[in-house]
Amino acid sequence: MCASLSPPESTSTPIRVGIVGLGYIGTTVGGQLHRHADATIEAVCDLDPDQLESLGDEFGVPPERRYTEYESMLANANGKLNAVLIATPHTLHYEQVVAALESDLHVYCDKPLTTEREHARDLVERSAHTDLTLMVGYQRHLQTAFQLARDRFDSGPPRWVTASITQDWIADSQETWRLDPALSGGGFLYDTGSHVLDGILWTTGLEPTSVAASMDFHDVEQRVDSRAHLDIRFENGATGTVSLHGDLPTTREHIHCWDDDGALYIEGTQWGSRDIFEIETDASERVPYIDHRREQTRADAFVESIRGGPEHEPPATARDALRVTALTEAAYEAARTGERVSVGLE
């Protein structure tokens, strides 16, 4: 799933995109779409008038197509938009994705797709019965390290997985919606941790069946976790431990997957592409060559999925997102009750 170093020149009418939410993701992925030869930003929506003005100017969107309510943007979308980028707080995603799909628009939605299992199941059903693209913002699916790991485990999943990530998340999230569970749905696990769970599940093909968990909470209501430790059991008898700490000074990620032939280590710092190491049974290491410059951007993948039609599945689907949401919700329940909880994918 690699792209050329530069996006190809446009050969057709650009995909007309509206952006809902002009924070980090709306700005980053929106900027990729703005610069893409096969896409153009036609409308923007945000509650912050300064962001509307600044990003509207940057993306060349005229004032009459700058909205403070996404419903108004969608109501005026007929014939003017082909797709929507949803980059709003987590708990708002489901309602906005449904509204966009019902407006006959392709959707790129930031992770997590939803913060409720039933909503995730509903979007799986909706995506299965439409020709529209619904792509979820799990960008690890576009990184070569994770693709190589997925290729290795295509013939059989690993037996043991350990993973961890650290971040100065609590400090970074002060005075933002991320510490408001009504908008975030949870804490560090639902935010950065969502990427880690997705990376494990997507690359290995493992199906989680149950989870035990412990958490430290930032709030007295025990909804916003700052630290989480998950003990996961999988369908094939494999086990995994995932440790997430959102109150440490720097970002480092480690995912280690072991099978009878050794292990794959996926590691990295901050938010760049990850590196991969192959561990042999004699404990020796091999480092596969990776050309990170050839990895697709999220905009590249979204446009390609739309252009490819219903037979071209996006890199991260609603089915992928359902597994992450189901495991996440089970982990929160397990931490609060002290019991091992069924993941409940079915």
Image (tube, rainbow, N blue to C red):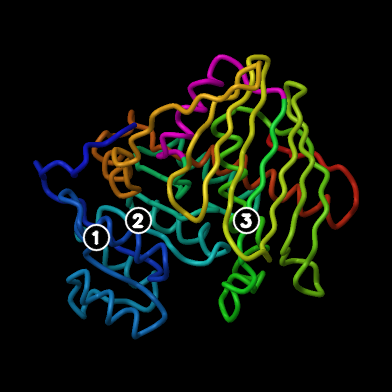
Q: Position of residue 211 (x, y in %)?
A: 79, 41
**Range drawn in magenta:** 141-159
Image quadrant holding the N terminus, namely top left
User: What amino acid is labelled 1 in the image?
Assistant: Asn
In the image as oriented, which residue stretches furthest toward the bottom? 49
Foreground: disc 3 or disc 2? 3
Q: Earlier in the sequence, mark 1 or mark 2?
A: 1
Measure the alpha-carbon separation of dots 3 and 1.
29 Å
Judged from the image, the secondary structure of the residue bearing numbered disc 2 is loop
Residue at 61% in and 38% down = 255
User: What amino acid is labelled 3 in the image?
Assistant: Thr
Q: Earlier in the sequence, mark 3 or mark 2?
A: 2
Query: Callout 2: few (<14), some (14-19), or many (20+) C-alpha neighbours within 10 Å?
Result: some
Asked if labels 2 and 3 touch by Cβ distance under 8 angstroms, the answer is: no
Residue 119, placed above or below residue 145: below
**172 or 341, which is in the foreground?**
172
Asked if labels 2 and 1 touch by Cβ distance under 8 angstroms, the answer is: yes
Q: Position of residue 143 (x, y in %)?
A: 42, 39
Q: Please name the residue that numbered disc 1 is placed on.
A: 78
Judged from the image, the secondary structure of the residue bearing numbered disc 1 is loop
Q: Please name the residue that numbered disc 3 is placed on.
A: 115
Q: Please say whether residue 157 is one of the residues in the magenta stretch.
A: yes
Q: Position of residue 22 (x, y in %)?
A: 38, 71
Location of residue 44 (image quadrant): bottom left
Q: Please name the residue that numbered disc 2 is placed on.
A: 103
